Image (tube, rainbow, N blue to C red):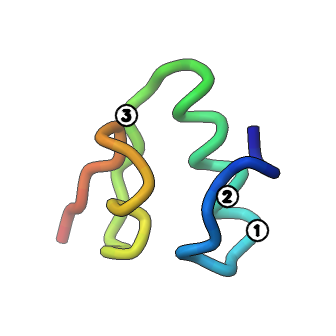
Amino acid sequence: MVANLPSHHRDPFDHLLLAQAMTEPARLYTADPILVRYSELVTLIG
């Protein structure tokens, strides 16, 4: 899953969090606007 993510973001830990959220599926809340590009499961806060 992580290897298939596009490289919008260079942080490997963010890729792991995204992969976990997409696998569960679970909502991922973040203040990082770049992560919103990956999935509808990512919600921008702050």
- Residue that protrudes farthest toward the top in the picture: 24
Contact between marks 1 and 2 (CB within 8 A): the answer is yes
Q: Quadrant of residue 27?
A: top left
Please tell me which residue is depicted at 67% across the width and 58% down the height of the picture. Answer: 15
Residue 35, image x, y percentages: 43, 64
Residue 22, image x, y percentages: 54, 31
32 up-or-down from 35: above or below: below
For marks 1 and 2, give the CA distance: 5 Å
Q: Foreground residue, 12 or 37?
A: 37
Residue count near mark 2 (Cα–Cα under 10 Å), binned few <14, some 14–19, many ≥20 = many
Disc 2 is placed on an element classified as: helix
- Residue 36 marker: none
Amino acid type at image mark 3 = Arg
Please tell me which residue is depicted at 63% across the width and 72% down the height of the picture. Answer: 7
Q: How many marks?
A: 3
Residue picked out by circle 3:
27
Please tell me which residue is depicted at 29% across the width and 41% down the height of the picture. Answer: 40
Residue 20, image x, y percentages: 64, 35
Residue 16, image x, y percentages: 72, 51
Please tell me which residue is depicted at 39% across the width and 45% down the height of the picture. Answer: 39
26 up-or-down from 19: above or below: above
Name the N-terminal-most of marks 1 and 3.
1
Disc 3 is placed on an element classified as: loop
Residue picked out by circle 2:
15
For marks 1 and 3, give the CA distance: 19 Å
Horizontal side of 7 relative to 37 (left or right) equals right
Residue picked out by circle 1:
12
